[in-house]
């Protein structure tokens, strides 16, 4: 596809043993559920510069915080990321 590189990524986390876990320096973490699928594209503008765009759909939180710091108001959402990578 020349300078274009499409991508699709699926991710999932599911801790459903209903046990709280304690991590030193972090605190206690309860059950988490989250699914996500990302669609994106990378364009190599030059041999040292690339431009990336990615849309991630996050769902399946089922009342948990998933990988967020706090429990979101909704059970799903979207995240749009745009970036420019440069190598010096």
Image (cartoon, rainbow, N blue to C red):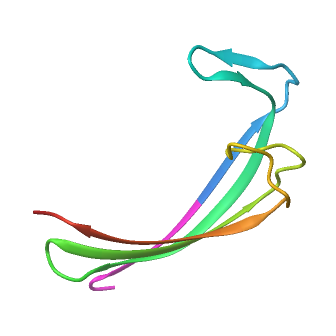
User: Does 28 appear above or below 32?
Assistant: above
Residue 8 counted in the magenta span:
yes
Q: Residue at x 67, y 21 (%)?
A: 27
Residue farthest toward the left in the current orientation of the protein: 88
Residue 20 point in image, percent of width and height: 80, 20
Percent position of residue 57, x then y: 69, 67
- Quarter-of-image position of residue 69: top right
Q: Give the answer, above or below, for where 70 lies relative to 17.
A: below
Quick one: quadrant of the C terminus?
bottom left
Magenta region, main secondary structure: strand
The magenta-colored residue range is: 1-9
Q: Residue at horizontal 56%, vertical 18%?
A: 25
In this rendered view, identify the residue nearer to me: 55 or 23.
23
Position of the N terminus by quadrant: bottom left
Is residue 40 part of the magenta span, yes or no?
no
Residue at 84% from the left image edge and 19% from the top image edge:
19
Is 86 left or right of 73, judged from the image as shown?
left
| Left or right: 8 as drawn, with respect to 49 | right
């Amino acid at each position: 596809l020349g300078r274009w590189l499409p991508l699709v990524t699926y991710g999932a986390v599911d801790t459903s043993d209903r046990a709280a876990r304690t991590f030193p320096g972090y605190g206690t973490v309860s059950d988490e559920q989250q699914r996500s699928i990302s669609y994106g594209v990378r364009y190599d503008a030059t041999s040292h510069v690339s431009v990336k765009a990615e849309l991630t759909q996050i769902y399946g939180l089922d009342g948990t915080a998933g990988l967020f710091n706090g429990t979101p108001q909704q059970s799903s959402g979207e995240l749009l990321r745009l970036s420019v990578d440069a190598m010096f």
